[in-house]
Image (tube, coloured by chain):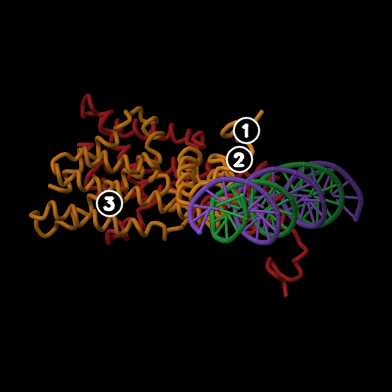
Chain colours: A red, B orange, C green, D purple
Amino acid sequence: MSIDGPGPEAATKRRRRVPEVARREALASARRLLITSGPTAVTLKAVGDEIGVTHANLIHHFGSAAGLQSALMESMVRDLTDALGAAVEQLRSNPGAPRALVDAVFDAFDQGGAGRLAAWIALSGDLQHLEPVRAAVRDLVDAICETFAAEGEQTHHRVTSAVLFIALYAFGDAVIGAPLRDMLDREDDAGRKIVARLLPTFLF
Amino acid sequence: MSIDGPGPEAATKRRRRVPEVARREALASARRLLITSGPTAVTLKAVGDEIGVTHANLIHHFGSAAGLQSALMESMVRDLTDALGAAVEQLRSNPGAPRALVDAVFDAFDQGGAGRLAAWIALSGDLQHLEPVRAAVRDLVDAICETFAAEGEQTHHRVTSAVLFIALYAFGDAVIGAPLRDMLDREDDAGRKIVARLLPTFLF
DNA sequence: GATGTAACTTACATTTATGTAGATATCGTC
DNA sequence: GACGATATCTACATAAATGTAAGTTACATC
């Protein structure tokens, strides 16, 4: 009886991945662990066990445990910025549908674990990992300003207010929204509805 | 030359605290560590070093490291609920001043570290520590409903929306507000101003 | 001043995460 | 099929966090 793995006779076999695949598998596993069990669960051993390699192998690919964490943060930040970009496209093609934009941003924080990741980064104090987000946020603001260019002098101020509003709220919702809604006996998308209703206040 | 401590001739002396004082000092130190250096910095050794006792002594008082963490969470949750109670009193004495209520709630999450604590709890999955908050939130909702009793059928729905709104936003602001405002070149109280402006939308 | 309780310490054991060194196996290439 | 690069593993080392046991000391009470 083989403990686990590809099979009885393959128990002594190694699976040799190309480095890029090995890194991708490891990062996917690390993200899963972060989302389901929290930051402390993302250890070399836990990730290695999930994808069937030793912890030493992960050090080989990422240099160190900190290297793995950095790569994970980088990967999740990239996904978040991609989602924000998609949200802007969404807004451009249909400026009058705030709920679609809200869903895009909320999903970015909720699924993919960007909210939990941001909380982890903030709690750990590794703020340098948030730097890539700065450029993405700048782009987001510029894009929205362009879409609402005719609004006059206060456009930039209103847009930054709107971005601050939706980002903080989506973050909070992703991290503690579920238990809080449970305490208040509110439906799952209560937060999204509120934001979608208030967002036009900023932009129009 | 004494390394550190109360003084040269007191180097061999022990300081014997009454248990309540020992616990209070330890919890204050643990909170400081949590706020300044993140959850992983709250270890028995770190807390012990700060208040001048050994890690074994902390185990003596709290039973285990988990016991210390639970006590810390309990203490911070109590402070948060106290602050929420004060916010309700504030609202009762002056129902027309949203900014005062907003400041009270934001300070509860910001100072005292309730926001960081909640993030830690949510990330770790120790949701049972949030149970005391449930009762506090219920009280808060009831108190606000009472204050605005004349508003008719939808009062409860509107109030829960308002509480969800301000709590999620204050939480988000406490955890990632600072870096996000920096990215957007916005002033420190930008978040509070936005919430104070929008809050009447729910209640009136 | 003697005594008992318990706060506190020291010393040791265990577990877990991380890191290093060297051996081994896999796969592309000749 | 031999060979070289390297992905992967085994084995060992280290550090930190937690926990346990037993001894010490401070302080209240008599």
Where disc 1 sits, the SS reads: loop
Q: Percent x, y for residue B154? A: 14, 58
- Helix, strand or loop under label 2: loop
* Residue at 20% across, 47% down: B89
Dot label at residue B164: 3
Closer to viewer: mark 3 or mark 2: 2
Q: Residue at x 64, y 39 (%)?
A: B12
> Front-most of A11 and B165?
B165
* Type of the residue with mark 1: Glu
Q: Residues within 10 Å of mark 3 (few under 14, many from 20)?
A: many
Q: Residues within 10 Å of mark 1 (few under 14, many from 20)?
A: few
Q: Is residue B196 above or below residue B143?
A: above
Q: Earlier in the sequence, mark 3 or mark 1?
A: 1
Q: Amino acid at mark 2?
A: Lys
Q: Quadrant of the N terminus of chain A?
A: bottom right
* Mark 2 and mark 1 residues within 8 Å of each other at the beta carbon: yes
Residue occupied by mark 2: B13
Q: Chain of mark 3?
A: B
Q: Nearer the viewer, residue D13 or A95?
A: D13
Q: Residue furthest bottom?
A: A1
Residue at the spot 64% in from the left edge and 31% down from the top edge: B3
SS at mark 3 in the image:
helix
As drawn, the label of residue B9 is 1
Quadrant of the snapshot with the C terminus of chain A: top left
Residue appearing at x 16%, y 55% in the figure: B145
Q: Please say if the residues under marks 3 and 2 sit with CB atoms less than 8 Å apart.
A: no
